[in-house]
Image (cartoon, helix red, strand yellow):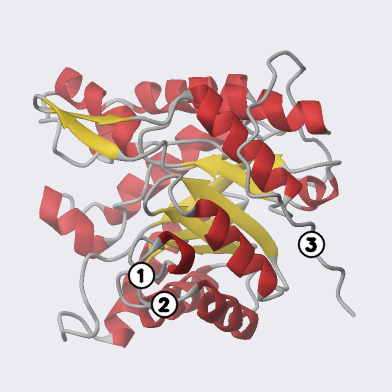
Amino acid sequence: MKEQRPRGTGADPLSGGGGSKPAALSGERFRRPVLYDGSVLYDGSKGVYLAARLADVGRSPGDASEWLNLLSPEAVRQVHREYIDAGSQIIQTNTFNGNRLRLEDYGLGDRVREVNLAAAQAAREAAGDDVLVAGDIGPSGKLLAMGEVDGQSLVDTFAEQAAALAEGGVDLFHVETMSDLAEARAAVEGVRRASDRPLLLTMSFDTGKPEALRTMMGVTPAQLVEAAREMGVFGLGANCGRGLEGYQEVVRALADAQPEGVLVVKLNAGIPRMEGSQIVYDGTPERMAAYALWCAENGVGIIGACCGSTPRHIEAMARAVADRA
């Protein structure tokens, strides 16, 4: 019989400051985080956080942050270092838009290998031997259900990206922000064609009521758990979505379905709103620290942040989880 995961009270206790950061990882570079006494800290936003630096290389703020992998790799390395200094034990490559179908929209369709290889190398250089690098693979931007792309083309697209990330030295892969299980399966198949490194799979639960969130394509947390069991992924969970709203019910639903992999949660820093021409997220570091602590107390093994987060958020989260450990 599987061990039951602890349940939370539903409250959002705020972390009391202080405490040291979790110890740096060493030794076996992927097995070690699972053995860490407590939860493992992932990093935060890349694309949103890096967007402000696009103007420095002559690109518009709405362009793909992947341009920085080629035009300013030092800026990308610096962001990775900031997250590592904040306490991240896993960092994610700047490749959310790194598949061919999305890169074509930004004038980079013929530079897939170059973009992903540069991103993986920048992350690897920043991480050294003590921090893990996750190769980030986001959705294609095309809808299988609408016939905008076929399944085999998706597998080929994701395999191409994964091969370049593996060449650059990533320790694991993270297929993220998926809404369609069919596309998620294509991404997993593509990654496994290119590499046998461990794989995390997370979906974005952003539709419906907080007590019963689904993905845009109607996938429930329980359906993700069942599909992930069939695919045999190392870790599964939720990322992005509606920020902190409803995250507790999503975590509970994932845990109730008794996943065989490590639970992964990487949510937005609150709900975005417009202030003038700027998108602002209302999740403070203190609020994100409370979210991290709640997740750690409810069986989440890998905890990070997504859109709107910064190293300040991760530092507060790291302190909260370290205090618990």
> Which corner quadrant holds the C terminus?
top right
Residue type of the residue flagged with mark 2: Val
Q: Please state which of the two labelled residues, at mark 2 or mark 1, is closer to the viewer.
A: 2
| Between 279 and 164, the one nearer to me in the picture | 279
User: Horizontal placement of 75 versus 89: left or right?
Assistant: left
* Label 3 neighbour load within 10 Å: few <14, some 14-19, many 20+: some
Separation (CA) of disc 2 from disc 1: 7 Å
- Which residue in the protein does label 2 denote? 219
Q: x, y (%) of residue 53? A: 25, 22
Q: x, y (%) of residue 246? A: 46, 54
User: Horizontal placement of 116 versus 150: left or right?
Assistant: right
| Residues at circles 3 and 2 in contact by the CB criterion of under 8 Å | no
What residue occupies the far right of the structure in this picture?
A: 1
- Which residue in the protein does label 3 denote? 5
User: Horizontal placement of 284 versus 140: left or right?
Assistant: right
Q: Is residue 23 visible?
A: no
Q: Earlier in the sequence, mark 3 or mark 2?
A: 3
Residue type of the residue flagged with mark 3: Arg
Tell me the tag on residue 318: none
Q: Is residue 182 visible?
A: yes
| Between 213 and 201, the one nearer to me in the picture | 213
Q: Which residue is depicted at the point 53% across and 32% down?
A: 288
SS label for mark 1: loop
Q: x, y (%) of residue 38? A: 81, 42
| Residues at circles 3 and 1 in contact by the CB criterion of under 8 Å | no
| Between 93 and 239, the one nearer to me in the picture | 239
Q: Earlier in the sequence, mark 2 or mark 1?
A: 1
Tell me the tag on residue 179: 1
Residue type of the residue flagged with mark 1: Ser
| Residues at circles 2 and 1 in contact by the CB criterion of under 8 Å | yes
Separation (CA) of disc 3 from disc 2: 23 Å
